[in-house]
């Protein structure tokens, strides 16, 4: 069997045809260092026990904080929260500064954003490498959700609210 050469850019374009939801994942270490980033690689793994997973590039500067912290929160964004997705996708020294009054301390003192479509507060179960990413598996300890339409991402861009309804 011969190896097939795959163009990474083309593979990414093909994978982008699969529409996904958009999430912000947050964590905090015991010494107070915080991280937050925007992801679209989030999924339910099991209902019993309640497990979720998401994936992070293994070169992400946030990875050491997620490894060190025992908790994280996944915030599923609503259709009108593209500004949050964009904000947490960018580099910033303190990504949480503009959201002071919207933040609450969740499990493990992890920053939890209010007014999102759904939030899953998780205890980290495993972090496993797969190719150029790591899978972060979490046990859902607490969750909440609303009924708004979700923010969707497709072909490299956010979908308009009308497309998500």
Image (spheres, rainbow, N blue to C red):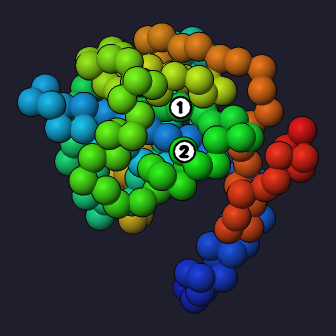
Residue 41 in view, yes or no: no
Instruction: Give the residue number, with chain letter if any, for mark 2.
Output: 84
Image quadrant where one finds the N terminus = bottom right
Residue 4 is left or right of residue 129, and the answer is right
| Circle 2 Cα neighbour tier, 10 Å, few/some/many (<14 / 14–19 / ≥20) | some
Quote the CA–CA distance across marks 1 and 2. 10 Å
Q: Residue 47 location in percent, x, y?
A: 61, 16
Which of the pair 111/155 is nearer the observer?
A: 111
Q: Residue at x 13, y 26 (%)?
A: 30
Q: Residue 55 location in percent, x, y?
A: 46, 49
Residue 75 has which mark?
A: 1
Tags 1 and 2 touching, CB below 8 Å: yes
Q: Residue 4 location in percent, x, y?
A: 60, 85
Residue 109 is left or right of residue 84, and the answer is left
Q: Which image quadrant is residue 23 in? A: top right
Q: Which image quadrant is residue 78 in? A: top right
Give the number of the mark in front: 1 or 2.
Answer: 2
Q: Residue at x 77, y 26 (%)?
A: 148
Residue 5 in view, yes or no: yes
| Circle 1 Cα neighbour tier, 10 Å, few/some/many (<14 / 14–19 / ≥20) | many
């Amino acid at each position: 069997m011969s190896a097939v050469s795959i163009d990474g850019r083309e593979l990414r374009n093909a994978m982008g045809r699969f529409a996904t939801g958009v999430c912000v994942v947050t964590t905090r270490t015991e010494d107070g260092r915080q991280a937050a980033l925007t992801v679209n690689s989030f999924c339910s793994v099991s209902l019993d026990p309640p497990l979720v997973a998401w994936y992070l590039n293994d070169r992400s500067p946030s990875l050491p904080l997620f490894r060190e912290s025992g908790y994280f929160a996944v915030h599923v964004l609503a259709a009108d929260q593209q500004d949050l997705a964009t904000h947490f996708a960018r580099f910033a020294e303190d990504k949480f500064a503009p959201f002071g009054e919207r933040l609450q301390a969740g499990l493990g003192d992890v920053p939890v954003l209010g007014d999102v479509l759904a939030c899953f507060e998780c205890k980290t179960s495993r972090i496993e490498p797969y190719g150029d990413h790591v899978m972060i598996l979490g046990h859902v300890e607490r969750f909440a959700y609303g009924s708004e339409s979700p923010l969707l991402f497709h072909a490299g861009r956010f979908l308009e609210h009308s497309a998500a309804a």
